[in-house]
Image (spheres, rainbow, N blue to C red):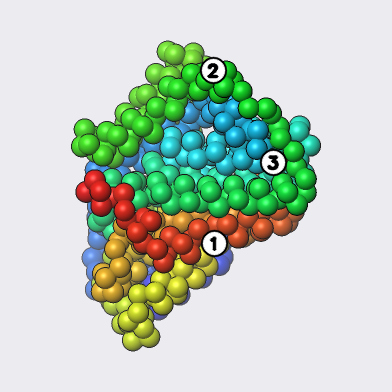
Amino acid sequence: MTAVLLVGFIALMLAGVPVALAMIVASLAYVMISGTVPDFVVIHRMYGGIDSFPLLAVPFFILAGNLMNSAGITNRIYNFALALVGWLKGGLGHVNIVGSMIFAGMSGTAIADAAGLGTIEIKAMKDHGYPIDFSVGVTAASATLGPIIPPSLPFVIYGMMAGVSIGQLFLAGVIPGIVMGLFMMATVTWYAHRRNYGRDTTFSWSSLVSTFADAFLALMTPVILLGGMTVGVFTPTEGAIIASAYALALGIVWYRTIDLKMLVKISMDTIETTATVLLIVAAASIFGWLLTVTRVTDAVAAWVLAFTHTPWVFLLLANLLMLFIGCFLEPVAAITLLVPILAPICKTLGIDLVHFGLVMVLNLMIGLLHPPLGTVLFVLSRTARLSVERTTMAILPWLVPLLAALIVCTYVPEIVLWLPRQFF
């Protein structure tokens, strides 16, 4: 009977059925054929999976990212990043990364970064004579910072599934995000010296101060969010609501870049994305519950623990598994599937679930960059008007700094856990 559940899910996925429907149909088929579980349990478990206060943050973080993209905030962030690091060799490459690091503190998703800030960055780099392959590669790599530097939509989903503090997960992403940014900037520097890229602007204190002043209110978003959650003024869920209200106030009242028609479109896009995310979570709730009931998770844990009791070996195997899964499933679906299987093993081996959450999300962000289902890959392919094959080749060299950051974060857990331990 367990084969009905697993083989059915895999067969439906291979047939091209969306992952949420594949999980629902496989679960329903198991319930109907086995006769050991009442039919109403499917709906009950799906409803219970999304009946969660932390998940209320999902639509609001999505709304905040959409508002930020539409309120003209991305242009102000780009101009500030240009004044800050545009004078370095390979200047716009550094601007691309620093701009993404700043925007990551507002959007929480890689897609928002690639679609919003990425569009501006690729056009600017093309206009300054940078090769399109280099422009697309650095934009794709920097987009992965979106869910690592808080706030982060995948962290919300992981925290809910693993029973981990979302506030701790948010703080855990700060230092790894900076490490990733430094690795990418080192790669830009290497390219700049090898290909003799020049500087794209001269350093000017007046320009830096004026662009900072113009972007100041936008730059306060991550400060308000992290500061409020760290000192206990509000929860991450309440922080998502505050971020949305703040972005709305900036777009409508201060910058006056959002009108009623645009607000309606933003709201509909948010509803559509939220429905997709929550359907996946609901489907994974019944699928994960059945995996537990049928003791599949216990069998996997027993097999892994029979193979090794060494945490670093398990982390190596888990990284390989998550990198592979990330090629075929988008992050929310992968998190909801993998957490029930891998979290119990982490507890047995004494691996901190906050540390493992950061490692899992970083793996799945790398999965967004390559075929067959890398969403950032397809977004940038359309943005740059390149074939998927050429976009893939442009991104491949940028997997080196990302994998290097993954290794560091996996095997030096203090980088991930130092900040959460200071405040929790």
Mark 3 or mark 1: name the one nearer the start of the chain: 3
141 vs 350: above or below: above
Camera sees residue 332: yes
Tell me how far mark 2 sits from mark 1, CA to CA: 37 Å
Graded by Cα atoms within 10 Å as few (under 14), some (14 to 19) or many (20 or more), the crowding at tag 1 reads: some
Across the whole image, how many numbered discs are drawn on residues? 3
Tell me how far mark 2 sits from mark 3, CA to CA: 23 Å
Choose mark 2 or mark 1, whichever is in front: 2
Instruction: Name which residue type carries label 2.
Output: Ser
Indicate the position of residue 271 as horizontal and vertical percent values: 42, 35
Q: Which residue is mark 1?
A: 403
Q: Which circle marks residue 90 in the picture?
A: 3
> Which quadrant is the N terminus positioned in?
bottom left
Mark 2 or mark 1: name the one nearer the start of the chain: 2
Indicate the position of residue 198 as horizontal and vertical percent values: 74, 38
Camera sees residue 294: no
Q: Which residue is mark 2?
A: 210
